[in-house]
């Protein structure tokens, strides 16, 4: 059995605590004013623990001759498959490739690997694009999901213009 397939005692403890918290939240929701208990539970989980139940990502990879090659993008997608335990869909679009993942439990998600992939993507688009990386918190089937949206954005003005002297720029009076 691979090392990744074994359960870690800390992970089993987290699952038990999470199940107990779910039961307590379910019981509290039956009591009048239970919506407040759910909201407080979500706020605690989001802002104090900073630990979601699941992770999800949506990434767009623009393609063109001056951008990363298809081979580089394919390598990033393979690494994303590992980080999200193989639960992703790849879509070919006009001028880009999009990757959408299913929500993956926190126990299966490799956060360090995902961070390394994000750095590799930033390095790949360094010369031509800025990376917009948004993190959203959502509720999905009673679970708290942290969704990452990553989009390389082409800058409005080329970076080479910032190096020119101010005298050459047109100034409106």
Image (cartoon, rainbow, N blue to C red):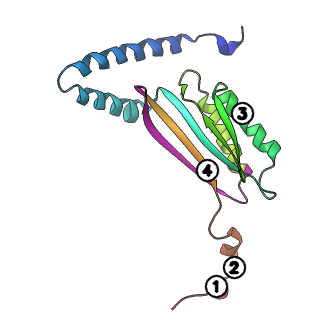
Residue 84 placement (x, y as % from top left): 63, 28
Left or right relative to 165: residue 17: left
Work out which quarter of the rendered image holds the N terminus and state it: top right
Q: What residue is shown with label 2?
A: 164
Instruction: Answer few, some or many: residues within 10 Å of disc 4's Cα (few below 14, many 20 plus, some between 14 and 19).
Output: some
> Which residue is outermost to the left?
32
- 164 is higher (above) or lower (below) than 58: below
Q: Are marks 3 and 2 in contact (CB under 8 Å)?
A: no
For the point 36% across and 18% down, the residue is 22
Dominant secondary-structure state across the stretch colored magenta: strand
Q: Which residue is mark 3?
A: 79
Write down the residue under mark 1.
169
Q: Of the numbered discs in the image, which one, if any, rests on residue 59? A: none
Q: Position of residue 80 (x, y in %)?
A: 68, 34
Distance between mark 1 and mark 3 Cα atoms: 44 Å
Choose mark 4 or mark 1, whichever is in front. 4
Question: In the rendered structure, which segment of residues is drawn in magenta?
Answer: 124-143
Determine the image quadrant of residue 64.
Answer: bottom right
- Mark closer to the observer (4, 2): 4
At a point 61% along the width and 28% down the height, the residue shown is 110
Lower position in the chain sequence, tag 2 or tag 1 = 2
Q: Residue at x 29, y 32 (%)?
A: 39
Residue on which disc 4 sits? 151
């Amino acid at each position: 059995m691979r090392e990744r397939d074994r359960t870690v005692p800390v992970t089993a403890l987290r699952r038990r605590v999470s199940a107990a918290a779910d039961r307590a939240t379910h019981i509290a929701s039956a009591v009048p004013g239970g919506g407040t208990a759910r909201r407080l539970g979500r706020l605690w989980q989001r802002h104090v623990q900073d630990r979601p139940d699941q992770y999800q990502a949506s990434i767009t990879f623009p393609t063109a001759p001056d951008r990363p090659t298809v081979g580089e993008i394919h390598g990033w997608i393979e690494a994303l498959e590992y980080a999200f335990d193989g639960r992703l869909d790849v879509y070919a679009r006009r001028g880009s490739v999009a990757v959408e993942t299913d929500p993956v439990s926190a126990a299966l998600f490799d956060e360090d690997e995902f961070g390394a992939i994000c750095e590799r993507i930033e390095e790949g688009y360094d010369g031509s694009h800025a990376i917009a990386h948004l993190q959203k918190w959502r509720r999905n089937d009673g679970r708290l999901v942290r969704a990452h949206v990553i989009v390389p954005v082409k800058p409005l003005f080329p970076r080479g213009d910032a190096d020119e002297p101010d005298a050459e720029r047109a100034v409106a009076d």
